[in-house]
Amino acid sequence: MHTASHNDPAMGARFIEMIFPEHANHYGTLFGGNALSLMGKAAFVAATRRARTAVVMASSDKIDFHVPVRVGELVELDARVSRVGRSSMTVEVEVTAEALLTGERRLAMRGSFEMVAVDAGGKPIAIPSTETSSATEERPT
């Protein structure tokens, strides 16, 4: 197992999205399907940065919605690779909501995604080892 700083881009992804009415449901809060899409995008970027090859989502696991996110708030997505196997990776994603006017921040949702490195034909391939990996290198998955 190798270690890297938490800020190492090869081990994660962080980005911010503004929640507009087109992202909301009829309650004026972020629609769950849109939230999952944002989380999946963050997991994809983190996994691709780690593998430096094409990746696909194999599954999502235990997505917890803690609090609603209102229209006009920001969401900050923080994705990090927590496990690396032979061809698959687990990516943990946390979403923090922020009220722009007050600065109040709260954990809105959290989930886990299983991502698989694939070749041009969509077949699983081995994830290259890196010297900067901070995830558990537990081959053979």
Image: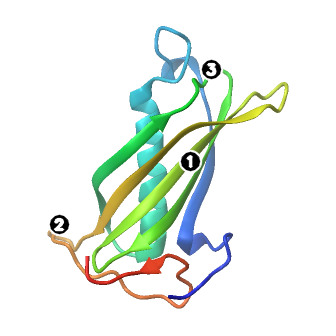
Mark 2 Cα shell of 10 Å, populated few (<14), some (14-19), many (≥20): few
Seen as rendered, the residue at the extreme top is 26
25 over 50 or under it: above or below? above
Seen as rendered, the residue at the extreme bottom is 131
Q: Secondary structure at mark 1?
A: strand
Q: Nearer the viewer, mark 3 or mark 1?
A: 1
Residue under pointer 2: 122
Give the left or right position of residue 104, taking residue 85 as reference. right
Q: Nearer the viewer, residue 129 or 112?
A: 112
Q: Nearer the viewer, residue 52 or 102?
A: 102
- Splitting the image into 4 quarters, where does residue 79 fall? bottom right
Q: Are marks 2 and 1 in contact (CB under 8 Å)?
A: no
Q: Secondary structure at mark 3?
A: loop
Q: Are marks 3 and 1 in contact (CB under 8 Å)?
A: no
Check disc 2 and give the amino acid type.
Gly
Check disc 3 and give the amino acid type.
Arg
105 over 122 or under it: above or below? above
Check disc 1 and give the amino acid type.
Glu
Q: Secondary structure at mark 2?
A: loop
Expressed as whole percent of the image width and height from the top left, the position of residue 62 reads 38, 44
Mark 3 Cα shell of 10 Å, populated few (<14), some (14-19), many (≥20): many
Disc 3/disc 1 C-alpha distance (Å): 17 Å
Residue drawn at (51%, 51%), measured in percent from left and top?
93
Expressed as whole percent of the image width and height from the top left, the position of residue 61 reads 34, 48
Q: Which mark is residue 81?
A: none
- The C terminus - image quarter: bottom left
- Splitting the image into 4 quarters, where does residue 7 fall? bottom right
Residue drawn at (41%, 88%), measured in percent from left and top?
129
Residue under pointer 1: 94
Give the left or right position of residue 135, taking residue 97 as reference. left
Residue under pointer 3: 70
